[in-house]
């Protein structure tokens, strides 16, 4: 099975992220131009992989702004006509294609309900771009493989710009400038993902666990594995894994633990050890020497999300190949899902 498109689009990420990092200050200024004053909170509106990018935005925005940040429930507005008021809120609508009718409709409705709105899209001329007060256009080029790769990491960097518009973020300019090279280093080292894929390819179920800022990467890793392989993968907080689901982990249910350093490291490592004690195959993705999926050292937790997400893309593509599946076009999936 080929996977040529997915691998080619993965390989474009360092340069795409470098361009977005170079214009990071401009994107921050664009968001500040529509930011409510005073800011009541930030709400992220998305589906699919974009929703996982939104989770990263939610964590960073609340950390930066000191105001509540959350995820919109689109069906409250499309199915239930919720009479919500959004005065003082910033709504960030995220869509790779910018064409999902549900996201376009809800963005307009929340704007009419008092929110200021920002669209994060690949193409500024998309319907979603026309529905918002401001647009952050990723411009990462066409993405033809069904599993989103370069658009997801691009969206995550746009989420960081949104957060930085509301307050201080936990990384500096030099660290941001180093991040694309860290992603490039991961892409240049595919062997660890390939070796793990061979061991885990025939699993029926799988957990991806993380804490805090890496939680979004765990959700995205699980989605990529589900999309490309058909394995029932679940992204989960390491804290939630302790509360019952750890009972599922065992000899035939592997656990991938994402360790981005920072505040979540101790708990992620503790849960990984607990899963090992239960007999589960466990692999750690992190920057410590014992990690089966190594990450480059030196990035703060908030930016370790990017190489961790790319490691997961590598693993998903390799597991699909080991199962004889073409990750470019998984059965039953399309690039644009027209939810209403």
Image (tube, rainbow, N blue to C red):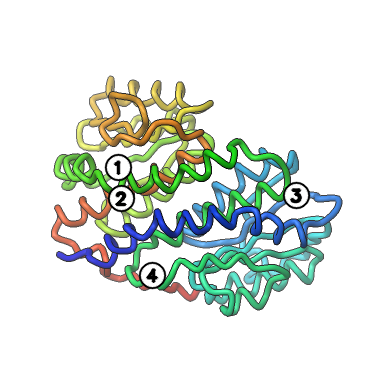
Residue identifier under label 1? 206
For marks 1 and 2, give the CA distance: 6 Å
Is residue 213 found left or right of 271 in the rendered image? right
Image quadrant of residue 28? bottom right
Q: Residues within 10 Å of mark 4 (few under 14, many from 20)?
A: many
Residue identifier under label 4? 143
> Residue 161's spot in the image, x, y percent?
62, 52
Q: Is residue 340 visible?
A: no
Residue identifier under label 3? 41
Task: Tell which tag, 1 or 4, sits nearer the viewer.
Answer: 4
Decide which of 16, 6 is in the foreground and name it: 16
Query: Considering only order in the chain, which callout, 3 or 4, is on the residue closer to the N terminus?
Result: 3
Secondary structure state at the residue bearing disc 4: loop
Secondary structure state at the residue bearing disc 3: strand
Query: Considering only order in the chain, which callout, 2 or 3, is on the residue closer to the N terminus?
Result: 3
Q: Is residue 9 visible?
A: yes
Query: Considering only order in the chain, which callout, 2 or 1, is on the residue closer to the N terminus?
Result: 1
Q: Which mark is residue 232?
A: 2
Query: Considering only order in the chain, which callout, 4 or 1, is on the residue closer to the N terminus?
Result: 4
Looking at the image, residue 175 lies above or below residue 37: above
Whether label 3 touches label 1, CB < 8 Å: no
> Residue 182's spot in the image, x, y percent?
39, 42
Query: Considering only order in the chain, which callout, 1 or 3, is on the residue closer to the N terminus?
Result: 3
Task: Tell which tag, 4 or 2, sits nearer the viewer.
Answer: 4
Whether label 3 touches label 2, CB < 8 Å: no
């Amino acid at each position: 099975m080929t996977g040529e498109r997915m691998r080619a689009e993965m390989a474009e990420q360092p340069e795409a992220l470098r361009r977005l990092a170079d214009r990071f200050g401009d994107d921050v200024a664009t968001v500040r131009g529509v930011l409510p004053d005073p800011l009541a909170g930030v709400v992220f509106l998305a589906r699919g992989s974009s929703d996982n990018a939104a989770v990263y935005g939610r964590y960073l925005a609340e950390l930066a702004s000191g105001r509540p940040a959350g995820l919109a429930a689109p069906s409250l507005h499309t199915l239930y006509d919720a009479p919500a008021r959004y005065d003082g809120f910033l709504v960030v609508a995220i869509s790779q294609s910018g064409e999902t009718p549900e996201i376009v409709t809800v963005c307009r409705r929340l704007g009419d309900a008092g929110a200021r709105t920002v669209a994060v899209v690949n193409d500024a001329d998309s319907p979603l771009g026309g529905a918002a007060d401001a647009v952050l256009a990723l411009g990462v080029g066409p993405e033809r493989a069904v599993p989103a790769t370069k658009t997801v990491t691009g969206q995550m960097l746009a989420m960081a710009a949104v957060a930085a518009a509301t307050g201080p973020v936990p990384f500096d300019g030099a660290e941001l400038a180093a991040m694309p090279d860290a992603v490039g280093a991961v892409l240049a080292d595919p062997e660890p993902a390939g070796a793990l894929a061979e061991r885990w390819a025939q699993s029926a179920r799988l957990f991806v666990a993380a804490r805090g800022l890496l939680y979004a990467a765990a959700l995205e890793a699980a989605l990529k594995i589900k999309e490309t392989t058909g394995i029932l993968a679940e992204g989960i907080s390491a804290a939630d894994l302790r509360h019952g689901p750890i009972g599922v982990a065992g000899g035939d249910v592997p656990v991938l633990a994402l360790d981005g350093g920072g505040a979540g490291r101790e708990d992620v490592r503790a849960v990984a050890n607990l899963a090992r004690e239960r007999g589960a195959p466990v692999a750690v993705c992190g920057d410590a020497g014992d990690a089966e999926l190594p990450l480059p050292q030196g990035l703060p937790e908030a930016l370790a999300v990017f190489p961790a997400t790319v490691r997961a893309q590598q693993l998903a593509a390799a597991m699909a190949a080991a199962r004889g599946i073409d990750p470019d076009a998984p059965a039953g999936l399309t690039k644009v899902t027209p939810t209403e």
